[in-house]
Amino acid sequence: MSNFTLVSEFLLMGFSDIRELQIIYSLLFLIIFLSTLLGNLLIVIVTTLDRRLHTPMYFFLRNLSLVDACYITVTLPKASTNSLLNSMAISKGECVAQIFLVVFFIYEELTCLTIMARDRYVAICHPLHYTVIMSPRVCMQMTLTCLFTGLLYAAFHTGYTFRLSFCQSNVIQQFFCDMPSLLKISCTETFSNEILIVASGLGVGGSCSRSTVTSFLFWERGPSKDLSVSDLFTETDLLGPLILKVLAVVQPSHTS
């Protein structure tokens, strides 16, 4: 059996070899990170302090804002720091944590959007039973279920990815650790990993997207016609980037 050199760190892909551009990219990442973080934290603070907003809709909106803030915290600060210090290295432990958290927060974001769509469906199509169907206890149960299943989902994918040996290279063609990039530099068979990523990605992403779209269709047929075009565009704007994230995750690392 061949002896493989154990990889203790990886090298992330930089955006430029020009020092001035590296500083500009670092500042740009910092601005994007701070603006996104402050915007989401503002939503969390307002929906927490204003008792009039203590409803299921704003409860899930607060959860979504927390997930968004955490998700961007996983990737952009490291990318900004690396670009500023001109150091693309990331330890294996940091890479493991980054993949786990990225997968976890993508899962949470998708499921949170699905629950929000379900909440609006109940509010519009069953307004008289809304407080019973979407009671605080039910909202908390759905949230905890998403958290628990998200932890299991992320832990399984992370563990199944890092069972592989990495000996061809330690250079990741991405500015953060992701599973498809790691599969490309693995020196062991990755076919089962690719099938698992595609199947689970299509399963989770497809089912969440289908549930959201189905809720929209029922909204239009419901007794209430309060759903505005802006509501539809808002939900589509939230779901669109998440679909792109899932497509990026589920693409095979290489063609056979």
Image (tube, rainbow, N blue to C red):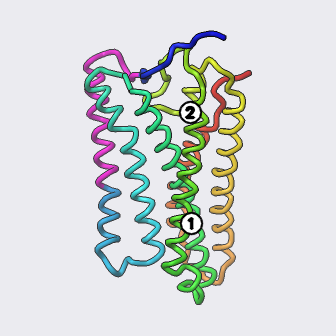
- Quarter of the rendering containing residue 226: bottom right
Of callouts 2 and 1, the N-terminal one: 1
Q: So how many labels did they put on this image?
A: 2
Tell me: residue 76, above or below residue 13: below
- Mark 1: few, some, or many residues within 10 Å (few <14, many ≥20)? many
Q: Closer to us: mark 2 or mark 1?
A: 2
The residue lying toward the viewer, choosing from 12 and 188, is 188
Q: Main secondary structure of the magenta part?
A: helix
- Quarter of the rendering containing residue 41: bottom left
Residue 217 pos. (x, y %): 68, 68
Q: Which residues are magenta?
A: 14-38
- The extreme top residue here reads 2
**Magenta stretch: includes residue 30:** yes
Residue 90 pos. (x, y %): 39, 26
For badge 1, the amino acid type reads Ile
Horizontal relation, residue 189 to residue 20: left or right: right
* Residue that label 1 marks: 115
Tell me: residue 169, above or below residue 110: above
Residue 243 pos. (x, y %): 58, 47
Residue 135 pos. (x, y %): 52, 81
Q: Residue at x 39, y 45 (%)?
A: 72
Mark drawn on residue 227: none
Q: Quadrant of the C terminus?
A: top right
- The extreme bottom residue here reads 128
Tell me: residue 138, above or below residue 167: below
